[in-house]
Image (cartoon, helix red, strand yellow):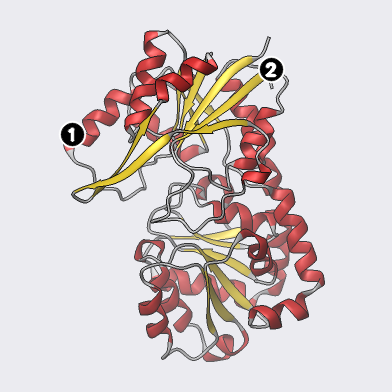
Amino acid sequence: MKHRLAIVTEIISPYRIPLFNDLAQHPAVDLHVIFLADTDPGLRQWRVYKEEIRFSYEVLSSRRMRLGSTQLLLNRGMAGALQAFRADAILCGGYNYAASWQALAWARRRKVPFLLWSESHSHELRRTRRLVEFLKNEFLHRCSGFVVPGRLAREYLHLRGIEDGIIFCAPNAVDNQLFGRAAAAARANSTVLRKELNLPDRYLLFVGRLVREKGIFELLQAYAQLDASVREQVGLVFAGDGEQRARLAQQSEGIAGAVHFAGFVHREQLAAYYALAEALILPTYTDTWGLVVNEGMACGLPLVVSDSAGCAPDMVREGWNGLLVPPRDIARLASALNTLATRSDLRTTMSQNSSQLIAEFSPRQWSAGVARAIGVES
C-alpha cells in the first residue's frame, strides 16, 4: 500500500518540478503537492512550466497583501485539501505562512506525521523580531521530523534544540541531465551562440538577482582589481535582473574590460551562458542554498562561492572544484577570480570534478531522502 504524502509549498518553482516528478515515480509513495500560489509576480520572473508536471497537484485560492514591510500570502482551503487527499504524512516547505500553521494544526489533530522542509542556517542575515523567533520555535518543536538540504541546515536545527535522529537529508537538486545536455549542445555551437548572445570569448559568470546582498558590487570591484592584461582577455557577465542593475551598470562604465549585462535569462538559454563561461561566481552575503551552483556544476563549471551560501560546505571543495571566499572580502574575491582566470589547468581539473560531484545532488537523491524521512524504503 502506498504512503500518501502531501507536500505544502509556496509556488510552482521550475527548480522543484523535477524533484516532485521523481518522487511521484516512487513505487511506495502517492504524492500530492499543494501550492499556495502559481508564482510570485513581484519577485520572480520565472516561467511556470506546468506542461512538465508529472505529479498530482492543486493551487489553493490565495491573496497577497502587505502589512507594513511584511508581505502576507493568505489562502483558503488548506484543511479541505488535506482531508480530500487523506494524507498519511505532510512535508511543509516553511513556517511563515498562515496555511503552514493550518496544515500543522490539521496534522496534530489527526496524529499525522508533520515534517518541515527546513533550509534555514545560521549564516543567513535575516533580522527577525522576538515574536517571530518565538513563533518559529513553537512551530519547530511541534514538528515530528525535518528534511534538510545539507550540513548548514542540519547544524541550524541542532542549535535550535532539535535531535539529530529526526533530521533527514534530501540534497537540493536541479535537473542535471537537462542542463548537462543543453550545455553540451551550446559548446558544440559556441561560435554562433557567442555572437547571438553578445558574449566575450572568455568570461566569468554571475547568475542571480541583481540586489546588493548577492555581493554584486564587491564582484564588480574585485574584477576591477584584476590586472588590465587579464581584463583584456576575460570579461564579466551578469545574467539576471533586479533593483540594483542600473547602479551596477553605471559603476561598470569606468572599468576597462568587458562587463556585460544579459538581463533576466529564462531556462531555455541559461545553460548556454553557463556552458560558454570559464567559472561561476556567487559572492553572496547570504543565501539559503544557491541553486545556481547546482546548475553551474551540472554544466561543468569551476566555482567561486561565498562561504555564507547554504550550499558551500556540501558542494564546494576548496581547491578541488572551486574556491571559497568570505562575503564582502574584495581582496580575497579578486585573488580567487585571478586564479581561475589565469590557470587553465586548474579550471580543467575543477570542471571535471564539478561534473563528478553533481551526480550526488540529483532529483533521485532528493526523493530518496524524502522517502526515508516518511519511513519508506528508497
Q: Residue at x 63, y 47 (%)?
A: 174
Identify which residue is drawn at 35% across, 23% down.
102
x then y, percent, for residue 363: 66, 39
In depth, the one of 38 and 275 nearer the eye is 38
Q: Quadrant of the C terminus?
A: top right
Q: Residue furthest right?
A: 188
**Residue hosting label 1:** 131
User: Amino acid type of disc 1?
Assistant: Leu
x and y percent of residue 42 in the render? 38, 56
Query: Do labels 1 and 2 touch, CB within 8 Å?
Result: no
The relative height of residue 220 versus residue 113 in the rendered view (above or below) is: below
As shown in the figure, which amino acid type bears the numbered disc 2? Ala
Q: Is residue 14 above or below residue 113?
A: below
Left or right of 183 in this view: 342 = left
Residue 310 rendering spot, x and y as whole percentages: 46, 47
Residue 144 placement, left or right of 49: left
- The residue carrying pointer 1 sits among few (fewer than 14), some (14 to 19) or many (20 or more) residues within 10 Å by Cα, namely few
Mark positioned earlier in the residue sequence (1 or 2): 2
Q: Quadrant of residue 210?
A: bottom left
Give the structural element (helix, strand or loop) at label 2.
loop
Residue 284 appears in the picture as rendered: yes
* Residue 320 visible within the image: no
Q: Position of residue 244 (x, y in %)?
A: 36, 71
Say what secondary structure mark 1 lies in: helix
Which quarter of the rendering shows the N terminus? Answer: top right
| Drawn side of residue 158 relative to residue 31, left or right | left
Q: Residue at x 25, y 29 (%)?
A: 135
Which label belongs to residue 28?
2
Query: Is residue 240 shown left or right of residue 327?
Result: right
Front in this rendered view, residue 353 or 121: 121
Near mark 2 (Cα within 10 A), the count class, few <14, some 14-19 or many ≥20, is some
